[in-house]
Image (spheres, rainbow, N blue to C red):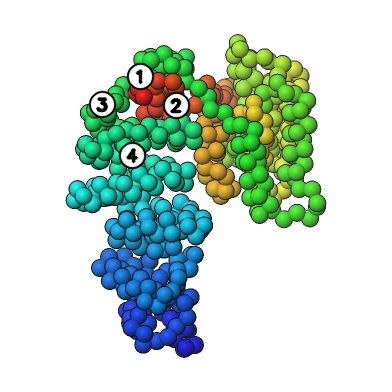
């Protein structure tokens, strides 16, 4: 037995399929007696088989083997069985296993249902009766597990609906499910892009037949040019922001070693709490100092950050509906730049003492990622914006709730464009890293800002209408929208 055990493990580890099926066949024919967990191992290995013919043959044999020997599936086997039967197109069976899982109170996760959804998006190629059966399964899954769906799966679902529109008997069902789908998108702030508009437009005629008529519209002063609905801003609630704060602390703790009891991030959190309590009405503009300071040629230049503070302050001063007293500029900067930046800041002639009073600076500890600090600051303060061009694709972002994080991103990021020009007459009299270049040409930095829209660029639902951005990129201010009636 031990020999077979080791042998089986080695075969699986070395991905030797010929030998695996050889030994597997012996197991299924009762030529070798093995323990149940060996079977689970075989199942897991089988689930990686791409040859559908082989997969189908052994899967049937394996299921029979369980039945004949009155064996129960292990909890971890259910998602595998569902994966295999889905890839074999046996969605009815997948659904039965799913119900079994539910009865046994095994938690159902996205990875359990995802192979079913994937398989369904291909199933319109099948014959009609089977198609209707599969459609019914799809509807059941959607009703029960839509909260597990990911953006990509909503697309697949929409594509399914699109293909099922020709099933006349199902039209009412589709209509009601689409209605529900749109409601959910509004709730969870579905990440929308051109893809969904393309899907909707490609079947416009059919969608019209079930009551959805699509129009290209413009949004002027947050208002739709067709229906006059005002678009809303979907801010994160306190609890949602708190969730992001928790998740950020967890990733931070996994990635940093602290000798002290209180970490740098704990100190920063206390600092933010004290600042935001004192200034409930304040709007925090949090500056990703590292990103801004490095934005000219990759070398950190304190002057650039100071120039940015000047440009931002003047820009905000022009905004009529802003109470200038409540503006706080919080610079997050790595400790290694402290000496240089402080010196430049104190001696700076471009920003006066009035601006300097509004500026707070927080230096982040050595060996720590300063991005975590400005993220935390902004998650904690409702009225906050982060000035950065950071793409936010770092690993710590992966640990955050995707939907909440994207919603935060849409509402709280200010991007900037830095213009560098050479000005031969202007005097810059600081001693700094660019001094050598200054002796030849005086460099002038100028920032322009791209503020977030006053409404959320995403799926929106009002009393009678839905609105959907049909073109969206981070650097495009002019977004096209479509408007359609409920
Ligand atoms: Zn409209």
- Tell me the mark number nearer the camera, choosing from 1 and 4: 4
Q: Residue at x 60, y 18 (%)?
A: 315
Q: Nearer the viewer, residue 486 or 446?
A: 486
Q: Position of residue 229 (x, y in %)?
A: 43, 16
Residue 217 - label: 1
Distance, label 2 to label 1, CA atoms, is 14 Å
- Give the percent coordinates (x, y) of residue 13: 44, 75
Label 1 to label 4: alpha-carbon separation: 22 Å
Q: CA distance from mark 2 to mark 3?
A: 20 Å
Q: Which residue is mark 4?
A: 158
Give whichever of discs 1 and 4 has the lower sequence position: 4
Residue 122 lies, in percent from the top left, at 27, 50
**Local secondary structure at mark 3:** helix
Quarter of the image for residue 443 reads top right
- The residue labelled by disc 2 is 460
- Counting residues from the start of the chain, the first of labels 2 and 4 encountered is 4
Q: Position of residue 208 (x, y in %)?
A: 26, 26
Asked whether residue 402 appears in the rendered view, the answer is yes
Answer with the quarter of the image where residue 53 lies.
bottom left
User: CA separation, marks 1 and 3?
Assistant: 17 Å
Q: Residues within 10 Å of mark 4 (few under 14, many from 20)?
A: some
Give the mark toward the camera: 2 or 1: 2
What is the distance, in whole Å, between disc 2 and disc 4 at their CAs?
A: 17 Å
Which element is circle 2 on?
A: strand
Query: Can you tell me whether the CB of the residue at mark 1 lies under 8 Å from the nearest atom of ligand 1?
Result: yes
Front-most of 255 and 430? 255
Query: Could you tell me which residue is drawn at 34 percent across and 73 percent down?
Result: 64
Identify the residue at image location x=72%, y=48%: 366
Circle nearer the N terminus (1, 3) = 3
Q: Which residue is mark 3?
A: 208
| Mark 2 neighbour class, 10 Å CA radius: few under 14, some 14 to 19, many 20 or more | many
């Amino acid at each position: 037995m031990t020999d077979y055990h080791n042998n089986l493990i080695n075969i699986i580890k070395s991905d030797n399929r010929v030998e695996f099926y050889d030994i597997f066949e012996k197991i299924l024919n009762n030529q070798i007696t093995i323990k149940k967990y060996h079977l689970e191992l075989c199942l897991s290995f089988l689930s990686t088989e791409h040859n559908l013919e082989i997969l189908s043959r052994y899967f049937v044999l394996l299921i029979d083997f369980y039945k004949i020997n009155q064996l129960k599936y292990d909890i971890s086997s259910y998602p595998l069985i569902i994966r295999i039967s889905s890839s074999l197109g046996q969605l009815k069976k997948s659904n039965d296993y799913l119900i079994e899982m539910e009865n046994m109170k095994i938690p159902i996760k996205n990875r359990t249902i995802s192979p079913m959804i994937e398989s369904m998006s291909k199933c319109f190629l099948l014959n009609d009766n089977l198609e209707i059966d599969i459609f019914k399964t799809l509807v059941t899954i959607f009703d029960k597990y839509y909260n597990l769906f990911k953006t990509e799966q909503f697309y697949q679902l929409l594509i399914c609906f699109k293909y099922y529109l020709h099933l006349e008997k199902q039209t009412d069902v589709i209509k009601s499910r689409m209605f529900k789908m749109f409601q959910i998108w509004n709730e969870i702030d579905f990440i929308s892009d051109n893809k969904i508009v393309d899907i909707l437009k490609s079947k416009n005629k059919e969608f019209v037949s079930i009551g959805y008529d699509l129009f290209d519209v413009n949004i002027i002063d947050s208002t739709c040019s067709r229906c006059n609905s005002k678009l809303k801003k979907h801010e994160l609630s306190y609890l949602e922001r708190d969730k992001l704060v928790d998740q950020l602390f967890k990733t931070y703790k996994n990635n940093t070693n602290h000798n002290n009891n209180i970490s740098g991030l704990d100190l920063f959190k206390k600092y933010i709490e004290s600042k935001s309590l004192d200034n409930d009405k304040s709007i925090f503009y949090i500056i990703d100092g590292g990103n801004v300071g490095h934005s000219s040629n990759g070398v950190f230049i304190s002057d650039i950050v100071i120039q940015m503070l000047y440009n931002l302050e003047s820009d905000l001063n022009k905004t009529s509906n802003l109470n200038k007293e409540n503006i706080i500029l919080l610079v997050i900067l790595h400790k290694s730049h402290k000496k240089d930046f402080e010196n430049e800041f104190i001696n700076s002639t471009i920003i006066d003492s009035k601006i300097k009073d509004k500026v707070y600076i927080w230096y982040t500890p050595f060996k720590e990622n300063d991005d975590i600090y400005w993220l935390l600051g902004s998650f904690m303060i409702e009225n906050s914006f982060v000035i950065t061009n950071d793409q936010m694709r770092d690993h710590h972002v992966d640990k955050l709730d995707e939907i909440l994080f994207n919603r935060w991103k849409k509402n709280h990021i200010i991007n900037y464009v830095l213009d560098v020009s050479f000005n031969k007459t202007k005097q810059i009299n600081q001693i700094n890293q660019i001094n050598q270049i200054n002796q030849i040409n005086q460099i002038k930095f100028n920032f322009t800002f791209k503020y977030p829209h006053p409404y959320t660029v995403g799926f929106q639902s009002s009393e009678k209408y839905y609105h959907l951005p049909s073109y969206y990129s981070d650097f495009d201010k002019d977004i096209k929208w479509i408007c359609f009636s409920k």
